[in-house]
Amino acid sequence: MHMVRQDCGSCHGMRMTGGLGPALTPEALAGKPVESLAATIYHGRPGTPMPGWRSMLTAEEAHWIAQQLLDGLPDAAR
């Protein structure tokens, strides 16, 4: 969760409400398949600032992050 907040948050905003990258809130991601989100995390998006994280994450970890984003990240204070 620390990596998501720090690394992803640097572009998507510390609360995942958007910045350089789009918002990653449950509302913004509603209707998007977890597999698609996991693939974006793992492989990135060519032609955009979104890097692939496959050198640092497994496909299973990318899937876990995608599911956490869809479910809403736990409060940072927890």
Image (cartoon, helix red, strand yellow):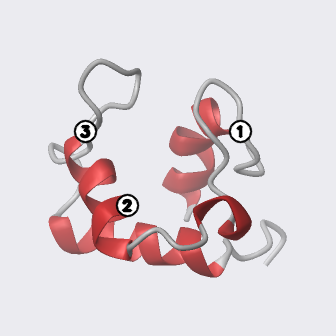
Helix, strand or loop at label 3? It is loop
Helix, strand or loop at label 2? It is helix
Q: Quadrant of the C terminus?
A: bottom right
Q: Quadrant of residue 20?
A: top right
Specify whether 9 is left or right of 31: right
Image mark for residue 18: 1
Residue drawn at point x = 53 percent, y = 75 percent: 68
The mark closer to the camera, 2 or 3, is 2
Crowding near pointer 2: few (<14 within 10 Å), some, many (20+)? many
Image mark for residue 3: none
Crowding near pointer 1: few (<14 within 10 Å), some, many (20+)? some
Amino acid type of the residue tagged 2 in the rendering: Leu
User: What separation in Å lies between label 3 and label 1 (alpha carbons)?
Assistant: 18 Å
Q: Mark 3 or mark 1: which comes first in sequence?
A: 1
The residue carrying mark 3 is 52
The residue carrying mark 2 is 37
